[in-house]
Image (cartoon, grey):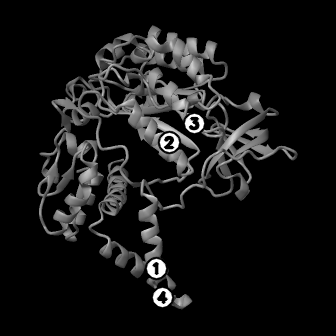
Amino acid sequence: MKLWELSLRKAQEENKKIVLAGCVPQAQPRQDYLKGLSIIGVQQIDRVVEVVEETIKGHSVRLLGQKKDNGKRLGGARLDLPKIRKNPLIEIISINTGCLNACTYCKTKHARGNLASYPIDELVDRAKQSFQEGVCEIWLTSEDTGAYGRDIGSSLPALLWKLVEVIPEGAMLRLGMTNPPYILEHLEEMAKILHHPRVYAFLHIPVQSASDTVLMEMKREYCVADFKRVVDFLKDKVPGITIATDIICGFPGETDQDFQETVKLVEEYKFPSLFINQFYPRPGTPAAKMEQVPAQVKKQRTKELSRIFHSYNPYDHKIGQRQQVLVTEESFDSKFYVAHNRFYEQVLVPKNPTFMGKMVEVDIYESGKHFMKGQPVSDAKVYTPSISKPLARGEVSGLTEEFRNRLGNHLNSVPHTSAANRRESASSRMVLRLQRLHQDFALKMSVGLALFALLFALLVKVYN
């Protein structure tokens, strides 16, 4: 029994109310460990409040259907739903859901189905709103950003050119993962976009294997030459660009020769960002029925590729350079602020509160495997993006000014308490506020999304 199944069983034994969300329950809703539990499908985020309320009442609710408009599949939940950003400075926008591929090892297609893209105007409006709320960095995400628009007669470059028009000076846009087949036809335009001063020169292009035989068994719909063509073209047209990629070690049928081809690719390109995954057969996928590579062999290949990846330092030659970086978060050890340069390379800077959310000029004085350290230039001006003050951590995005005032007026009407009772009073005020405004749609959605985020994070943590 898997760890997450054990966690679910423990929660049930303690009579806790459980709501599951995400790709795994969507793809396998009839699994024994899901019996009697409420499930929210990947396109039903906006109905999480209903599901939670019914579950609390003791009912089991399952919303797993696909949303359609006049028979056409929609991209997912509305983009303008209220939400709480994990980082108030970063907005994550999903531009489409589903994909066009049918990779033999992937479970995502089972859950999310075929490609469904959001209209360009809705995505641009969401970006505008984000900047009005103080965001200084936008991440575009999806199962495959390169496939964007193919279902609605548009394309990724068409979207990106519209987005860069609304990015304020000092703010940045980061592109998400794109598979090789869908970027080949847009190489010229993508190179121009990645040259834009408000777009990171960064692209995540998974190769998975450097063996055409393995790629064919994976049904990846490209060959190694296609991948190299994309990477070589972008490296030539966008000097310094960061190319991140993924490798799967030990896919069914992978021979020693196949693996050595992958090793040669990594040694040739020395990817600064490389995600190495040991193959795991997902139940219900074609790859799970193939003849498996022995576990020890998979483990050894993963270890060997990791050794090669850690044998080179991609940033040593940048020591002494002067770079402009955008500061967006705190490091895990809380000793530095984390910033990114033009190529989305991580640069650690001193924890000066005036730097957060700003463009800072630094001199690189040290480098590691995954980062550089920068010393702010003494006479350089800290650049403030031409955007609003960011929302406070935990504040809900997407609420109208009128609704925010209602919340503020209610808090101001609550009597002051002693310091000893302040924390308890704050909690009480929050409970009272939620009770009194429970019928307000916007607040219901914001509370529901916050709860959904917690539930989803728990599921991912347990699953991993």
- Residue at the extreme right of the image, as rendered: 379
Is disc 3 surrounded by few (<14), some (14 to 19) or many (20+) residues within 10 Å?
many
Relative placement, left or right, of 92 versus 360 is: left
Q: Position of residue 30 (x, y in %)?
A: 12, 45
Q: Considering only order in the chain, which callout, 4 or 1, is on the residue closer to the N terminus?
A: 4
3D distance between C-alphas at marks 1 and 4: 11 Å
Is disc 1 surrounded by few (<14), some (14 to 19) or many (20+) residues within 10 Å?
some
Labels 1 & 4 near each other (Cβ < 8 A) = no
Residue receiving disc 1: 426
| Residue nearest the viewer, comparing 14 with 394 | 394
Q: Amino acid at mark 1?
A: Ala
Note whether residue 5 is visible: no
Q: Position of residue 8 (x, y in %)?
A: 24, 59
Residue receiving disc 2: 128
Point 40% across, 75% down: residue: 430
3D distance between C-alphas at marks 3 and 1: 37 Å
Q: Considering only order in the chain, which callout, 1 or 3, is on the residue closer to the N terminus?
A: 3
Labels 2 & 4 near each other (Cβ < 8 A) = no
Q: Which mark is residue 148?
A: none
Labels 3 & 1 near each other (Cβ < 8 A) = no
User: For the residue labelled by badge 1, is the local secondary structure a helix, a strand or a loop?
Assistant: helix
User: For the residue labelled by badge 4, is the local secondary structure a helix, a strand or a loop?
Assistant: loop
User: For the residue labelled by badge 3, is the local secondary structure a helix, a strand or a loop?
Assistant: loop
Q: Considering only order in the chain, which callout, 4 or 3, is on the residue closer to the N terminus?
A: 3
Point 57% across, 17% down: residue: 191
Q: Position of residue 400 (x, y in %)?
A: 43, 58
Q: Amino acid at mark 3?
A: Ile
Q: Amino acid at mark 2?
A: Lys
Q: Which mark is residue 167?
A: 3
3D distance between C-alphas at marks 2 and 3: 8 Å
Q: Amino acid at mark 4?
A: Pro
